[in-house]
Image: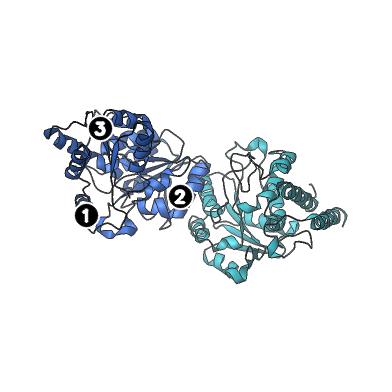
Chain colours: A cyan, B blue
Amino acid sequence: MENLKALAYELRENVIDMIVEGKAGHIGGDMSVMEILTEIYFDQMNISPENMDDPDRDKFIMSKGHSVEAYYAVLAKKGFFDIKDVIAEFSKFGSQFIGHPNNKLPGIEMNSGSLGHGLPVSVGMALAGKMDEKDYRVYTVMGDGELAEGTVWEGAMAASHYKLDNLCAVVDRNRLQISGNTEDVMAHDDLHERFRSFGWNVIDVADGNDIDQLKAALDSAKETKGKPTVLIANTVKGKGSSVMENKANWHHKVPNAEELEQIRKDLAAGKEAALHG
Amino acid sequence: MAKIANKQVICDVLLEAAKKDKDIVALCSDSRGSASFTPFANELPGQFVETGIAEQNLVSISAGLAKCGKKPYAVSPACFLSTRSYEQCKVDAAYSNTNVKLIGISGGVSYGALGMSHHSAQDIAAMAAVPNMRVYLPSDRLQTECLMKELIQDDKTAYIRVGRNAVDDVYEEGNVPFEMDKATFVTEGTDVAIIACGEMVKPAVDAAAALKEQGISATVVDMYCVKPLDKEAIVKAAKGAKAVITVEEHAPYGGLGSMVSQVVGSECPRKVVNLALPDAPVITGTSKEVFNYYGLNAEGIAKAAAEALK
């Protein structure tokens, strides 16, 4: 198997290129979510450009749609489109690579961007699988700030009501949103208990930027029957460079020349450590 | 045949189709009784989804089902479906191009005395403003049946609004002139054109009969397809008349009247009078009492038409 830890750093480099070239992007959340997407797309899911029309393949909804740059990097690596095109066109006039997922692009199921939609839509997809007695699994990734949306909890209620064990949600728990610390903006530090009380199987991933821990949690989710599973993946916003890590002002930011140089160095070092560390 | 409500027809058509097509799924938000969908839920429980009182979830779940090959019909009171779930209708249904049919029941002021929270007087404006969203307001049970049989065959998003109670037939059983996305000319006249949608079509037809007795010849256009709007029909009706009257069970802004005025203003300028609900919470009463109060009845329409010709 490919070294997914190193791959996550390579994809981060793609994201930086995209954001610098497009002069826009939700950089902090792209960095925090990268291992989650990498493990789901390159290890867990049965999905590829060749099997998109197969009704039995797995499904994915990027509920935290603003981390679209990370999603583009992953989809390009999977072969859905060319990363060079994304880097050249992202956010530019007339581009198909807009700042939130759009299903006119191959590989993307649903348009997202407005938060709190991914889980309810995933419930519908998982329900269809149950109705047709199919084995596919449905994954969705949400941000932690997103959990203030009431519709997340409407979806959570329905997922357990319909015993959707083919549904797995992952919360990118990086603890920062655009206005600051999630606990100051709208506290939900009892997240695990909240999901449990909604009837979910809850798995805490101590380090949500660790591929091995994510793999163990997602493997375990597959074995859980009769209820949906949520991973609370504790990640670091801006993961990969000290320039960005744990800084709320890097929610949406384009690095200047000096910052960029340091970020590139840090990401190269991260990749090197993953390969040989 | 005994009169039945348009929403009942929708259930009947879907239930028959769903017996042969397991991908047809009906979803309700604790609304199966008021939607007349209890027979569907009882006969095909495996093709019925209850979301509880959660209209936003209703639409998003429908979109997810559609994405996986199902043909979902989200059935809920129009007031909640169109505005509480507006963003889900916009993003998950229309923008994501999913085959979700949104059935708004008890639309307009059907819930009469229950107040503005239960009235949907904004749904035409709201839904028509969304790219990729079609908007239909059928006039009677016979046209509703024709419309649903067409909609079942396509795979695009649509919003359909019907009222709560049975309404008088506009058309004759076995002889319903219907072409998808083309307005129906119920009568053709030479003095005034009355363009109406939904449950306002029947009083418009009755108004035309009253006008005839006064020597005024009226065209009545049933614009059940509010979007895509049948502009050709509007131009044809307006060109053959001295004035145009629009009638709708909707707020005065952004509905059928606004749309017709845009077309007439640019294509064949004529005087256009918009009859609609007021820009205010409506007076308390049954829907019939409300219509009578605001002149949204045959008498009011005929009076407005006669005055427009003066």
The residue beneath circle 1 is B286
Name the element at disc 3.
loop
Indicate which disc, 2 or 3, sits on the residue closer to the N terminus. 2
Q: Residues within 10 Å of mark 3 (few under 14, many from 20)?
A: some
Which residue position holds label 3? Answer: B242
Mark 2 → mark 1, Cα distance in angstroms: 29 Å
Choose between B126 and B166: the one closer to the eye: B126
Vertical position of residue A193 compared to residue B225: above or below: below
Gap in angstroms between the C-alphas marked 1 and 3: 34 Å
User: What is the chain identity of the residue bearing mark 1?
Assistant: B
Which residue is at the front of the view, B18 or B305?
B305
Q: Nearer the viewer, residue B254 or B23?
A: B254
Q: Which residue is mark 2?
A: B59
Mark 1, secondary structure of its residue: loop
Q: Are marks 1 and 3 in contact (CB under 8 Å)?
A: no
Q: Which numbered disc, 2 or 3, marks the residue closer to the eye?
A: 3
Quarter of the picture holding the C terminus of chain B:
top left
